[in-house]
Amino acid sequence: MVATPPPDETTTRPDRLRRPSAAVAAGSPVARSESPSAAFLEMLELFFFAYRDFVADPDAILARIGFGRAHHRVLHFVDRNPGLSVAELLDILKITKQSLARVLKELVETGHIESRTGSTDRRQRLLYTTDKGRALARSLALPQIGRIAAAFQALGPDGAARARDFLRLMIDADERPRVSRYTNRPIARDPS
């Protein structure tokens, strides 16, 4: 008998399980055929390999301090959005409250994130990175930014814009406006 591994921090809520986007369901070239073309399979495989290498450097940094990818995602979005509420963070990450609770507790206990009470709603918890958290977020982002910058440079003058368009189009159409609120912004600073 094979044991089923426990769900990890990336487990999504059953009510938020992803369905194929409208483009795939409605008749993309892949949805209309029984078998995907070699070009689409190659892209799928390139995504897997690119993701593997994209997360390798941050994974090594995180492993040294006993953190994982869930810690990285939480730290990234809190650092980029000072004063982010727990509810907003749950909505961004599409994970359960229970999954977030453990990771957030560890980040608060280790002094990477600070939780403050909302000024208008005392029940609200607003999240901020500490100096320690901000430094870790930057150290995790730098190798990834370097990898992105090198790829953009190799693509040529319009490479960055084309890559950005491609990634945005990979996001479900109904999610794009919400996602755009969290992207393409200047570096945020803690107002306090």
Image (cartoon, rainbow, N blue to C red):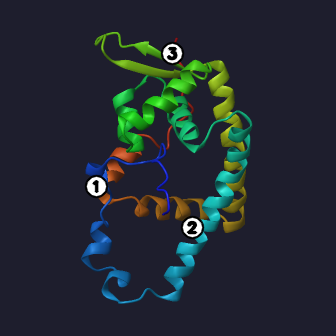
Separation of marks 2 and 3 at Cα, in angstroms: 37 Å
From the top left corner, tell me how far across and down residue 184 is, in percent.
50, 44
Q: Which mark is residue 47?
A: 2
- Badge 1 amino acid: Asp
User: Does 172 sit above or below residue 183?
Assistant: below
Which comes before the other along the chain, label 2 or label 3? 2
> Who's the residue at 32% across and 47% down the image?
13
- Badge 2 amino acid: Phe
Which comes before the other along the chain, label 2 or label 1? 2
User: Does 104 sit above or below residue 50?
Assistant: above
Question: Dot 3 corresponds to which residue?
Answer: 191
**Left or right of 83: which side holds 120?**
left
**Can residue 108 be seen from the camera position used here?**
yes
User: Does 126 sit above or below residue 61?
Assistant: above
Which comes before the other along the chain, label 1 or label 3? 1
Question: Callout 3: helix, strand or loop?
Answer: loop
Question: Mark 2 or mark 1, which is nearer to you?
Answer: 2
Question: Dot 1 corresponds to which residue?
Answer: 174
**Left or right of 1: which side holds 12?**
left
Residue 157 picture quarter: bottom right
From the top left corner, tell me how far across and down residue 144 is, in percent.
67, 49
- Badge 3 amino acid: Pro
Q: Residues within 10 Å of mark 1 (few under 14, many from 20)?
A: few
Question: Mark 2 or mark 3, which is nearer to you?
Answer: 2
Query: Is the residue under label 3 in contact with that under label 2 (CB below 8 Å)?
Result: no
